[in-house]
Image: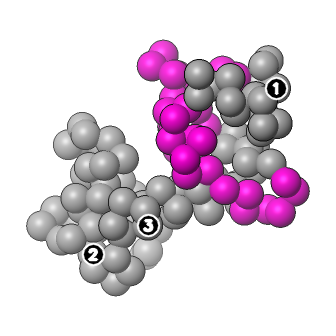
Amino acid sequence: MAALAIVDRGDMSPDQMRGAWAGEIGQTQFLAKNYLRFAVDGDGNGRRDLIRSKADVLASTANFLRQHGWRPGAGYQQGQPNFAVLREWNRAGVYQKALALFASKLAG
């Protein structure tokens, strides 16, 4: 039903509704229900495009994390408050550790 709602509100056309094997959509792999709840229009074009719009992807991912309790400056490595928020994104420990490592590399 969530996937149909994404099409109905005009974010994606039926032929764009392709995802991973478990139905995740977009660059940061939102389930359709989370796409509806957390996707935002970061580039201001009136649509939420988590496949082609970098601005939408980043703004939506930030929205998801914030809505799940992300605290700016609180750290995201194991044992720090925001690491638990990464668990809300994906329950696999290896995924959480990879996100924390990737974020560390981006932070430089």
Disc 3 residue type?
Arg
Against 53, residue 42 (above or below) is: below
Disc 2 residue type?
Gly
**What predominant SS class does the magenta segment belong to?**
loop
Query: Residue placed at 21% from the left, 71% from the top?
Result: 81
Tell me where residue 70 appears, x and y as whole percent: 36, 69
* Dot label at residue 13: 1
Tell me where residue 33 appears, x and y as whole percent: 52, 35
Q: Are marks 2 and 1 in contact (CB under 8 Å)?
A: no
Residue nearer the viewer, 39 or 81: 39
- Quadrant position of residue 15: top right
Q: Mark 3 points at which residue?
A: 66
Separation of marks 2 and 3 at Cα, in angstroms: 14 Å
The residue stretch that appears in magenta: 17-46
Separation of marks 2 and 1 at Cα, in angstroms: 38 Å
Residue nearer the viewer, 54 or 23: 23
Who comes first in sequence, dot 1 or dot 3? 1
Query: Residue placed at 31% from the left, 54% from the top?
Result: 86
Residue at the left extreme of this rendering: 79
Disc 1 residue type?
Ser
Separation of marks 1 and 3 at Cα, in angstroms: 28 Å
Q: Note whether residue 64 is visible.
A: yes
